[in-house]
Image (spheres, coloured by chain):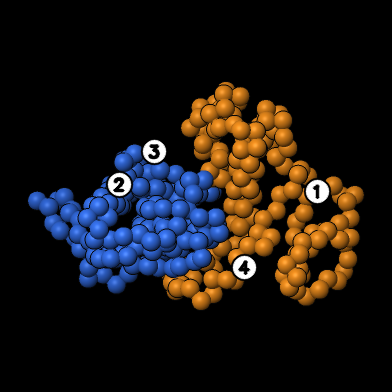
Chain colours: A blue, B orange
Amino acid sequence: MNSELKLSLILLEEYEKVNFYSFQFENETHTEFEKFLMSFRESHPADIGTIMYRLERITEDGVFERHYRYAGKVKDRTVELPSHLDSANLRLYCICISPKILILGNGGLKTTRTYNEDIYLNKCVETLQKIDFELKTKEKTFKIYIIDKNINGDLSLSIYDEK
Amino acid sequence: MVIYRYLFTTRNNNNLMKRNSIMEESRKLITPEIKQSVDFSIDIADRIFDILEMKGMKQKDLAKLLEKSEAEISKWLKGTHNFNIDTILKIQAKLGEEIIQVVGKAKNEVGIINWTERKFVILPKSNSYNSDSEIVEYAA
């Protein structure tokens, strides 16, 4: 049985070259990226510091390939922000809409060879893939439209969670 | 060859734009060591990109020269790879261009950015500089 999950895209921060968005599920008080930061900043400060600094570099350079690696499938825009430190395995999953728009999702510690082998990380990526699919559908039907670094229109989405 | 960044980038131009308090709080975890490590790694990758572009080469050409897979070269150029000296020397040799240059001790000069005049100058080392100036690492 599939259950419907309602969520909204939220503009978190804006910069001259780049805007960062995240998404917030209905009846929750924080976006997924905020939850990610709150979950790991005490236990993994160096990794969070690295991710935050990588985001800072992205605001200067734009959301270009050299700053992320692809995480999902070829057809989606799901990417992974790598942790610079080899000894750490904290991963943040995102959707790269354009060189000017990055949607920050959730993530966690990667302890398996691939994210697919980890139930939680796999779910993080799957959620982003579903959101990406919904966004593309809404773009095609002009319910949302992207101008420069802004996503405009109806930013509420529904995805289906397979139980 | 020169490796330095943000000479006259958008410094503090973003002050009035939207910020998130949890992200701001998390930014306090960025240490000078993290900055140095990430910047240096990205700068090396950028330099390799620039050489490839200058020579009209693609990542796959470099992969062929180094007898590596294109995927591995791609990983190196994402600025996330911990390069070791041997790898850098190999890339330098194959590309015929310097990637990193060590600053000589004999060179008694520093790079100074003057933010008011928006100028970058190289001056002899001194104990005093203008208050609106910033000393930056400089490699000639």
| Residue B1 spot, x, y in % from top left | 76, 44
The answer to the question of whether label 4 and label 3 lie on touching residues, with beta carbons closer than 8 A, is no
Name the chain letter of the residue that bears numbered label 3.
A
**In this orientation, which residue lies closer to the viewer: A144 or A130?**
A144
Residue B125 horizontal side relative to residue A8, left or right: right
**Callout 3: helix, strand or loop?**
loop
Disc 3 residue type (three-letter):
Arg
Q: CA distance from mark 1 to mark 3?
A: 43 Å
Do the residues at discs 4 and 3 belong to one chain?
Answer: no
Q: Residue at x 26, y 70 (%)?
A: A28
Q: CA distance from mark 4 to mark 3?
A: 40 Å
Q: Residue B140: which numbered mark, if any? A: 1
Name the chain letter of the residue that bears numbered label 1.
B
Q: Residue at x 39, y 48 (%)?
A: A79
**In this orientation, which residue lies closer to the viewer: A28 or A58?**
A58
**Callout 2: helix, strand or loop?**
helix
- Residue ID for mark 2: A122
**In this orientation, which residue lies closer to the viewer: A88 or B65?**
B65
Instruction: Say whether residue B31 is visible.
Output: yes
Residue B140 horizontal side relative to residue B57, left or right: right
Name the chain letter of the residue that bears numbered label 2.
A
The answer to the question of whether label 2 and label 4 lie on touching residues, with beta carbons closer than 8 A, is no
Dividing the picture into quarters, in which one does residue A101 lie? bottom left
Residue B8 horizontal side relative to residue A137, left or right: right
Q: CA distance from mark 3 to mark 2?
A: 12 Å
Pick whichever of labels 4 and 1 is earlier in the sequence. Answer: 4
Do the residues at discs 4 and 1 belong to one chain?
Answer: yes
